[in-house]
Structures are given as structure tokens and as C-alpha cells.
Image (cartoon, coloured by chain):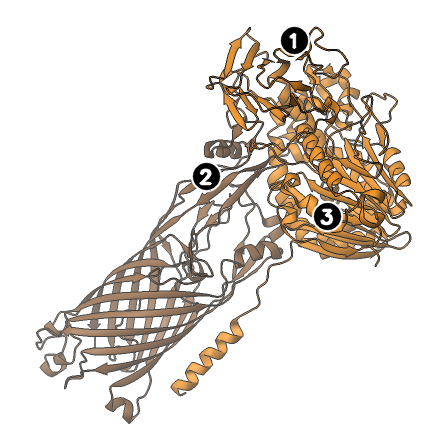
């Protein structure tokens, strides 16, 4: 062999040895056809590795261990969870399996067959796929119970007083009276959907009372107002311990607020008792309470106060759904836009999928979701019916209901979800509904596992919205609160619209208020959504922001406008954004951005609903 | 945190012979004992930027945003004893066996923490201690600041070099060429799939040499005296390294449930086809000092033969460029595979070595001692991990019949 030939041989080998290298897609689009089992099997087979990795990385490696941290708290309330079966890291899986089995009773045969198909295709057990398909509602319900238990031992904002409001010659609470006794003082403090007070003196002091049985730690008090942070070290803040439980905080900003200002007062504090198990060591911290108000010259009523963006670096936008039609849009078209955020855990975005179902009978439809889950939190059918749903924290949920049913023997009580998860209701909408009204009825007529808000639309211009909970006290509502764009609340404001042709819903109730009466169950405090949900204030803020944008774009809104709107950082949770969807009813197209975090960091891609 | 695994680009099979084409005289043995101290603290990106060996790990609280970012900057240190035995079967064919023994492996993880989102349930952002406290409540122990392992055998290499026949022009111009074939035996170990930090000792993990390597080498002597001893030699070597696919066991999270639990979707076993290499070396040997020469047992009492022995001091510098091919992880999860393959794309190693060899053969002592420094990061590479290696060795030459 000559030297030249040797070199040539080496080069030839080098060229042959360079293999292709490409990133597998983090978003997939698949089409499944046939019977429910066949469609499930195709889903599980085509996405086998993703179904398995989604289950492992989201549930086994993330959610199950995370929720196992709640076990000590839950055992203190429900001793059954101290049993052997729930030990050795099995707490969360066993808990969710119990709930999944309970939910399974509400699933029809076709759904169960589809789940079996997914399990067979992915090489997993039916139980695992069942847990994967019920965890959204179950986790939210259990997390809600755990959060309520946790917040019950955290400081509570007992009262808020805008000092001098009772003598300022202004009707600060829009009750039609000026400077009546107690004006400007709010005790007990009840979180408000809109503004708490208006037309306040810019230099007025604000006095708060916080309370907790273990005492409020003065060093943890934190107030954020008009882009200014005040702590216990700040000279503007005077802190007085009124008793072993009550702490008074008086804030007098060194420079008066601006006139005609709409702003938010944010209050946070922890108690004096440190918790060391499970780690890390921490006090029990209250939810950041956010109070919106205006100063002299703003000229708006409490009901019209819109929460401005908050820049304290501690808040993230919630999921949001927007429906528009008619006068709001260019050409009178109908759209639903949805940015869904909940938990990415650095894994959900790698497992996104748009699935076009082509059943043997009935319309084709598209769901936007995740590998192994047979539904999405949004979707559209060939009949031109679509939906988008977001969680609305509520203790009026089936898990709390199950505890109440077992309260006679709390030692044996368990947290059991019951009813139909919202995603399965979404599937039923796509399979059965012919318009937005019938879609709403699908949700209204079912037993719900958890609290949700949904916007529903159709290609004929139908636009509906609904808030639901589990109605565990049978209060006559059946847990159904239909919204219309024209309906006004007691203060004369539209519930969730800026016009007759739009809905803006976040992750809080606007009509189902209060969603549950305050009461004590086995020593645990049960309170309405607005008093505990971590979504409440951020949802109000996001909704207010979106309403402003819709009003500015009225008559010109189109697909591009909506894509830009739900991609705006004001509405994007940079850590837990899961997907962003625009349903184009006229063209029967589902436009989705997903496969990265945040979802809108990538392009919107079109999935045709028609096969 | 992502599991911290080192693939230590470090040990290079250190041929006991100077020049690219050197072979032993018939019936001659050489025993070489070398100590290698190898250190590694970076990997090259595709565009030649130095990156930490392990990717940052973003940790999330389910539904509560970013807890923070763990940024490991591991530094790995391996101490290796390389024992080499070579035998001249004929004057043109030499056989060799290389036995690398990893005496000690240490990895300092050097993990730093960047705070993430505010956590309302804590009333603060997670500090690093908060995070590990949280992790411990989920059964995940803190990643140790240092990992250490003791004596372990690496893959043993068998080799043979054949000095190819020279034609008249080659002989006249002091040009020679040789072919070398090396084959590794799978005596090394894989990393521990359950450990947060672990280093294996197989050739792929050491990134030292291929499982099978074929070399074609050439040397050209300059300033050759009447005994055939050169003052300058320029050598070149072209080689192809083949890596066999290796089977690994996936982690089940028995020790590190949050870091190493992937068998369910990766599969119990997976294959790593590391990608072959093609490379070349250019070297220059200079002999500034021939030294005194005397007839001795080494030269069979023959002064003329003693004069043909290597000079007393040889200085060598070399540059090696290795082109690595695309790696291929083969598990049940293409996404998981990709997250590993992206760090082992077709890449480049640039290795510069300087060696000083003192040979006492001319004065009748059958010993050579040498020291070498190999720099892997003097010149940036791509998608590889540059190790710096200091070597000190002693070489005994013996002829028993």
C-alpha cells in the first residue's frame, strides 16, 4: 500500500463514519384512527418512549416525591395515611391510585378502552396510565388541601386601615356615603376581586394587623408598595406587638404616592414557629396579600380598578383563557386563545403532542396535550366546537367532599377524588357537542373533580364561559356558574368581559364567589378561594391586563394579535408555561406553541382539525 | 441535579518507544513503568469555548417555579500506573502489552447555586442549603463535594508494530515507516449508574485510545552519523481508532432517586457507541547530547554497537489532532439519548506534548527515564474534554538470550 492510498483510505473511513445527528422533536403531531382502543394503542405505540419518560420524570421523579413531603401534615389530619401501604415512598402513588380508581367509575367504556390501548402501546400498566390521566385534577385537589392546612398555621391579615380615610371628605369605598364611621378600615379583611379603596390621600398612612396563634415574627414582615420595598428595618414602618398573637404594622411612606395612581400594596409575613420537618427549616408564611387601590384624582370606582403589573419579582402569571368574536375581531371571526401554565418541572415541555383523533363515528378532533394523556386542556372538533380550561382553586372539591363524607370516623378517612376530570369533559365536548351552548352543558351536567373555569366557542359565533366546583354541600348550584358576556354583577360590572363579544378568564372565580362557606372541619380551616389560592391575585392581575389589551385592539383582533397577546411576558410564566393555543374556528385550525419553556418561546404551528 | 458523571479525557496510551516507527531489536524486552497524573476540568463546546464538564441543572418546585440552578464545575484527577512490556519478536516486529492501573480517582464537584423564583411557602428564595434540605426530604442525598475511588484496572491493550520494508530510496534517505495495531481487552469498569459522581475505567470513559487502533507511521532522520544515530527526527503518524459499542446499566434511583432514576423509560440497559476517531501526529525528536559511549553489557562489549545506541538526551515535541465522530446513545428514549449525544458531536482534540528522555544505554546502564507533559487545552478543540497529563517513567531494556 502506498502512502497516498493509505491517506485516502483514512479519509474514506472518516466520511463513512460521520452519522446523522438531530434533536428529536419535543412537540409531536400524530393522527390516530379507529376504535377507542385502536386510537389509544396508536397513541401509546407512536409515543411509547415519551409516555414512559413523561410518567417517570414528571410523576415518579418529581410530583410523587414532592407530594410525599405533605405526608406528615396530612397524617396529622388523616391518620389513615400513616398506614404501611403509604410508607417507603409510596404515599403519593397510592394516594393518587386510590383517587384514580374512584374517578374511573365515572369513565365510560370507550374511555377506559382508550386508556388500555395507551397502556398496551406504551408497555405500561393500565393503572399507571389511569394515574397519568387523572393527576391534573387529583394533584390540584390534594395540593389544595395541603396548602389550606399549611396556610392555616400562617399569619392572617386581620385588618387593613387607610388612616384618615374616614375624615378626608371622599367616599373611599363607593358605598354612597362620605366619611361614615369606619370608612377606610376593612376588618375582617376580605380579598377583593377589584379595588379595595379609591381616592385615598397620597400621603396617608396604612395600618395593618396580622394575627397568628404562634405569633407573627416582626422580622419577616415585608411590604411592597409602588415599587418600593419596606421591611422591618425600614424607618417608614412601625411595628407593634399588640398581643402574643397580633402584630400591628403602620406604614407611612417617606414620600407621598403620586396623585391619580392605581397601585398595589403587597403584604407578607411569617410566624414565630419554625418548622424543621420536612426540611428546609422555615416559618409558616402567609400568601402575599395584594390590595389594589387608587389615590386622589384617579377617578375610577372600586369595581373599575384594574390591577397594574407587579414588579416585585415574586409573582408569575397564571393560566389565562380569552374568547373573542363579532365586534371584537377583524371580520367578526371567532377565536379562543389560551396560555396554560401549571407545572413544567423541566420535563412537560419535552412531551407535548397535538393529537388528531379520527374516530370510527363522530367528528374528528384535535387535542393539545402531553404524551400518554388522552386529552388536552384545550381542543377543537371538526364541528367547529372548542374549549380552553384553567384550574380555579377551590376547597369545594371532591377530595374535601370525600373527607366530609368520612368525617364521622376521621381516623379512616382518605382523600379521594371523585367525578370527571376536566380533560375528559373536554374530550366529551369534542366528541358530542354541536355548539358552544351544548359544550357548556357537557361540563355543567357532569360531576366535577375540582374547580375550573372554561371558555367555549363555536364556528357560528357562539361564545360561552363557565365556572365549576364540586358542590360538596349541595348548595343548589350543582357547582355550575354559567357566565354570559352581558350579565352584570351586583356592582354593575361585567363578570369577565369588556364587551358583548369577549371573555377573559383566569384562574379564579368571578361569579362563584364565595365558592365555599368558611368553616372548620376536624380542626382545619376551610375558606373560600380568594382567601387562600396562590392563583387568586395573579389571576386578577393577568385578567385586568388582558382586558386592557383587548379593549385597545377592539375590532382588529385576529390570530396574530392573539398569538402576540398570549406571548407577552405579562401573561407568560417563564418557569411553568406548558402550552399556548389559539383556536381559529373559521378555518378549523388549532395553532399551538409548545415544546419549550416558555411555550411561546417557539413558533405557533398549525394543526388542521379536518383529517 | 443531573447526575454527575465524568468521562475523563485523559490517559493516552503512552508508547514506550521514541519515534513513531521505533521497534525493538530481536529478542529484546523493554519494561516501562510510568506514573501519569491527569487532570480535567472542562469540555469544549462546538465553537471551541470552554464549558464546565457537567451541564447546569435547573431545579423546579412542581408548580412553584424555579428553585434555582445547580452549576457544577467538576475537577477530575486521576493517578495512573501504566505498565508496559514490549518484546522484539524480530528486528522488524515488536509485540506489546499495556496494563493501565488507575491508582486513584478524585472528583471535586464544585457545585455553586443560583437562586431561582421566590417561594411563597418558604417566604424566601431557596438557598443552596434550602435546596439540599428539600431534596433530602425526598430521599435525595446531597451530592458530595468530593468523590474518590481506589485502585482499579483499566482496559488492557495488546499491540504489535511492524517496521515495513524500505526501498532503496528510503534507506538512502533515512526514511522508515511502520504499521501498528492495538486491541483492547475489556478489563476496565463502567461508571456506577447509581452514584451521583462516578468515573469508569474503560477506554471510552477515559477517552484514552480506541478499542482497536490502526496506525501507519513514518520517520525521517536528519543529521545521521556513521552509526546510524540521528540528531533530528521528524515523525508522522496517521491512525484510526474504533470504539466498540458498550452496554451500560441504567439507574434505578436506589441511592439518588431524583438524579439517577431513568431505567423505566431508558430501559434497563442501553448502548453507547462512542464514535470512532481518526487522527494524526507530527513529532520532532532532537538529540542535543549524545553523551559518552562505552562498550558494555548493553552493547555486548562492542563499542561500535554502543555508538549506535540512542543519544543520552532526546527532546521531543509533538502535536496530535484527533477528529472524533458522532456518538450514538441507543436507549428506549431518543430524547434522553439526544441530551447525551449533544455533548459528543463530531469534534476535535488538539494535543501538544513535550517529552524529555534520558537514556543511559550508551554508558552501559539499560535504563531510560523520561518525563512528559501533555496539554489538551493549549489549543481549543470541539466537543471533547481536554486533559492535561504529567508523566514520569522509567524504562528498562533487557535481552535474555
Give the chain coloured brown.
B
Q: Residue at x 47, y 39 (%)?
A: B114
Q: Name the colour assigned to chain A in the rendering.
A: orange
Decide: few, some or many residues near mark 3? Use Cα within 10 Å; few <14, some 14-19, many ≥20: some
Say if residue A395 shows up in the picture: yes
Question: Relative to residue A281, is residue A354 depicted above or below?
Answer: below
Q: Is residue B312 above or below residue A253?
A: below
Q: For residue A400, which quarter of the picture?
A: top right
- Residue A336 placed where, x, y %? 79, 44
Q: CA distance from mark 2 to mark 3?
A: 39 Å
Residue behind mark 2: B113
**Residue A390, position in %: x, y?**
74, 37
The image position of residue B163, as x and y in percent, is 31, 82
A442 in relation to A264, above or below:
below
Circle 2 chain: B
Question: Label 1, label 2: how many angstroms apart (C-alpha)?
Answer: 52 Å
Instruction: Choose mark 2 or mark 3, whichever is in front.
Output: 3
In the figure, is residue A224 to the left or right of B225? right
How far separated are the C-alphas under marks 3 and 1?
Answer: 47 Å
Quarter that holds the N terminus of chain A: bottom left
Viewer-nearest of labels 1 and 2? 1
Crowding near pointer 1: few (<14 within 10 Å), some, many (20+)?
Answer: some
Kindly identify which chain the residue marked by label 3 belongs to. Answer: A
Of all residues, the one furthest to the bottom in this rendering is B168
- Tell me how many marks there are: 3
| Residue position for label 3 | A561
Q: Residues within 10 Å of mark 2 (few under 14, many from 20)?
A: some
- Element under label 1? helix
> Label 1 belongs to which residue?
A167
Q: Is residue B273 left or right of residue A490?
A: left
Output the chain of dot 1: A
Observer-nearest residue: B372 or B124? B124
Amino acid at each position: 500500500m502506498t502512502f497516498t492510498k493509505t491517506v485516502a483510505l483514512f479519509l474514506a473511513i472518516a466520511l463513512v463514519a460521520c452519522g446523522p445527528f438531530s434533536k428529536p422533536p419535543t412537540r409531536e403531531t400524530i393522527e390516530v384512527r379507529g376504535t377507542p382502543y385502536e386510537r389509544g394503542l396508536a397513541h401509546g405505540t407512536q409515543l411509547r418512549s415519551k409516555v414512559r419518560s413523561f410518567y417517570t420524570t414528571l410523576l415518579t421523579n418529581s410530583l410523587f416525591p414532592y407530594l410525599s413531603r405533605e405526608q406528615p401534615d396530612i397524617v396529622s389530619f388523616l391518620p389513615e395515611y400513616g398506614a404501611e401501604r403509604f410508607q417507603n415512598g409510596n404515599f403519593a402513588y397510592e394516594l393518587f391510585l386510590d383517587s384514580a380508581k374512584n374517578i374511573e367509575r365515572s369513565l365510560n367504556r370507550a374511555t377506559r378502552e382508550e386508556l388500555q390501548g395507551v397502556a398496551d402501546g406504551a408497555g405500561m400498566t393500565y393503572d399507571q396510565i389511569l394515574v397519568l390521566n387523572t393527576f391534573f385534577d387529583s394533584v390540584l385537589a390534594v395540593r389544595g388541601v395541603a396548602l389550606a392546612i399549611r396556610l392555616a398555621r400562617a399569619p392572617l391579615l386581620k385588618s387593613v386601615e387607610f388612616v384618615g380615610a374616614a375624615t378626608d371628605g371622599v367616599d373611599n369605598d363607593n358605598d354612597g356615603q362620605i366619611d361614615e364611621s369606619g370608612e377606610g378600615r376593612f376588618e375582617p379583611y376580605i380579598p377583593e376581586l377589584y379595588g379595595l379603596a379609591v381616592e385615598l390621600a397620597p400621603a396617608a398612612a396604612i395600618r395593618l394587623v396580622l394575627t397568628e396563634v404562634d405569633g407573627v415574627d416582626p422580622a419577616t414582615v415585608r411590604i411592597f408598595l409602588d415599587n418600593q420595598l419596606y421591611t422591618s428595618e425600614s424607618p417608614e414602618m412601625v411595628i407593634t406587638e399588640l398581643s402574643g398573637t397580633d402584630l400591628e404594622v403602620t406604614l407611612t411612606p417617606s414620600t407621598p404616592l403620586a396623585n391619580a395612581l392605581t397601585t398595589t400594596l403587597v403584604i407578607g409575613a411569617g410566624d414565630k414557629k419554625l418548622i424543621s420537618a420536612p426540611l428546609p427549616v422555615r416559618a409558616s408564611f402567609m400568601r402575599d396579600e395584594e390590595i389594589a387601590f387608587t389615590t386622589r384624582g384617579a377617578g375610577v370606582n372600586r369595581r373599575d380598578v384594574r390591577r397594574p403589573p407587579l414588579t416585585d419579582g415574586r409573582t408569575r402569571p397564571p393560566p389565562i383563557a380569552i374568547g373573542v368574536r363579532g365586534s371584537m375581531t377583524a371580520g367578526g371571526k371567532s377565536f379562543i386563545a389560551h396560555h396554560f401554565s401549571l407545572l413544567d418541572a423541566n420535563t412537560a415541555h419535552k412531551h407535548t403532542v397535538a393529537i388528531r383523533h379520527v374516530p370510527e363515528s363522530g367528528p374528528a378532533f384535535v387535542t393539545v396535550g402531553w404524551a400518554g394523556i388522552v386529552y388536552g386542556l384545550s381542543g377543537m372538533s371538526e364541528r367547529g366546537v372548542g374549549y380552553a380550561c384553567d384550574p380555579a382553586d377551590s376547597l369545594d372539591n371532591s377530595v374535601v367532599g370525600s373527607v366530609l363524607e368520612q368525617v364521622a370516623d376521621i381516623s379512616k378517612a382518605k382523600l379521594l377524588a371523585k367525578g370527571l376530570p376536566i380533560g375528559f369533559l373536554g374530550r366529551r365536548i369534542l366528541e358530542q357537542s354541536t355548539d358552544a351552548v351544548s359544550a357548556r352543558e357537557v361540563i355543567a351536567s357532569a360531576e366535577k373533580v375540582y374547580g375550573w373555569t372554561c371558555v367555549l366557542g363555536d364556528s357560528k359565533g357562539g361564545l360561552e364561559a363557565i365556572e365549576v366546583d364540586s358542590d360538596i354541600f349541595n348548595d343548589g348550584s350543582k357547582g355550575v356558574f354559567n357566565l354570559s358576556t352581558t350579565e352584570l354583577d351586583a356592582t354593575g360590572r361585567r363578570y369577565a368581559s369588556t364587551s358583548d363579544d369577549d371573555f377573559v378568564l383566569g384562574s379564579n372565580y368571578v361569579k362563584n364567589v364565595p365558592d365555599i362557606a368558611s368553616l372548620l372541619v376536624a380542626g382545619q380551616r376551610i375558606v373560600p378561594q380568594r382567601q387562600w389560592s396562590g392563583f387568586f391575585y395573579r389571576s386578577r392581575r393577568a385578567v385586568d391586563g388582558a382586558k386592557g389589551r383587548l379593549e385597545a385592539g377592539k375590532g382588529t383582533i385576529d390570530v396574530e394579535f392573539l398569538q402576540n397577546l398570549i406571548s407577552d411576558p405579562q401573561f407568560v410564566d417563564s418557569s411553568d408555561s406548558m402550552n399556548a393555543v389559539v383556536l381559529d374556528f373559521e378555518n378549523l385550525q388549532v395553532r399551538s406553541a409548545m415544546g419549550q419553556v416558555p411555550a411561546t418561546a417557539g413558533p405557533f404551528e398549525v394543526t388542521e382539525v379536518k383529517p | 441535579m443531573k447526575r454527575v458523571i465524568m468521562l475523563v479525557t485523559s490517559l493516552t496510551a503512552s508508547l514506550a518507544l521514541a519515534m513513531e516507527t521505533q521497534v525493538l531489536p530481536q529478542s529484546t524486552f523493554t519494561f516501562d513503568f510510568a506514573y501519569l497524573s491527569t487532570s480535567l476540568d472542562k469540555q469544549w463546546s462546538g465553537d471551541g469555548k470552554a464549558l464546565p464538564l457537567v451541564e447546569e441543572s435547573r431545579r423546579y418546585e412542581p408548580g412553584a417555579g424555579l428553585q434555582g440552578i445547580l452549576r457544577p464545575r467538576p475537577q477530575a484527577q486521576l493517578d495512573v500506573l501504566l505498565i508496559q512490556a514490549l518484546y522484539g519478536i524480530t528486528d522488524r516486529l515488536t509485540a506489546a502489552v499495556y496494563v493501565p492501573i488507575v491508582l486513584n480517582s478524585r472528583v471535586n464537584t464544585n457545585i455553586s447555586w443560583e437562586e431561582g423564583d421566590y417561594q411563597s411557602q418558604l417566604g424566601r428564595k431557596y438557598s443552596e442549603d434550602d435546596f439540599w434540605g428539600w431534596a433530602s426530604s425526598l430521599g435525595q442525598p446531597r451530592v458530595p463535594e468530593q468523590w474518590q475511588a481506589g485502585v482499579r484496572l483499566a482496559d488492557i491493550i495488546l499491540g504489535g508494530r511492524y517496521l515495513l520494508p524500505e526501498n532503496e530510496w528510503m534507506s538512502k534517505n533515512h526514511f522508515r515507516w511502520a504499521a501498528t495495531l492495538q486491541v483492547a481487552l475489556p478489563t476496565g469498569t463502567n461508571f456506577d449508574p447509581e452514584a451521583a459522581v462516578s468515573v469508569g475505567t474503560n477506554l471510552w470513559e477515559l477517552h484514552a485510545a480506541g478499542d482497536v487502533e490502526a496506525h501507519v507511521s513514518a520517520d525521517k532522520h536528519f543529521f545521521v552519523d556513521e552509526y546510524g544515530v540521528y540528531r533530528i527526527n521528524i515523525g508522522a503518524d496517521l491512525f484510526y481508532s474504533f470504539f466498540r459499542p458498550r452496554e451500560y446499566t441504567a439507574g434505578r434511583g436506589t441511592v439518588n432517586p431524583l438524579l439517577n432514576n431513568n431505567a423505566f423509560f431508558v430501559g434497563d440497559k442501553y448502548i453507547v457507541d462512542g464514535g470512532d476517531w481518526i487522527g494524526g501526529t507530527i513529532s520532532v525528536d532532537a538529540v542535543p547530547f549524545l553523551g559518552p559511549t562505552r562498550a558494555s553489557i548493553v552493547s555486548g562489549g562492542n563499542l561500535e554497537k554502543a555508538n549506535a545506541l540512542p543519544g543520552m538526551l532526546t527532546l521531543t515535541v509533538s502535536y496530535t489532532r484527533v477528529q472524533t465522530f458522532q456518538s450514538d446513545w441507543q436507549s428506549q428514549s431518543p430524547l434522553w439519548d439526544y441530551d447525551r449525544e449533544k455533548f459528543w458531536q463530531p469534534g476535535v482534540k488538539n494535543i501538544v506534548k513535550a517529552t524529555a528522555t534520558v537514556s543511559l544505554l550508551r554508558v552501559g546502564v539499560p535504563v531510560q527515564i523520561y518525563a512528559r507533559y501533555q496539554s489538551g487545552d493549549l489549543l481549543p478543540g470541539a466537543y471533547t474534554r481536554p486533559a492535561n497529563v504529567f508523566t514520569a517513567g522509567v524504562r528498562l531494556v533487557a535481552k535474555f538470550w
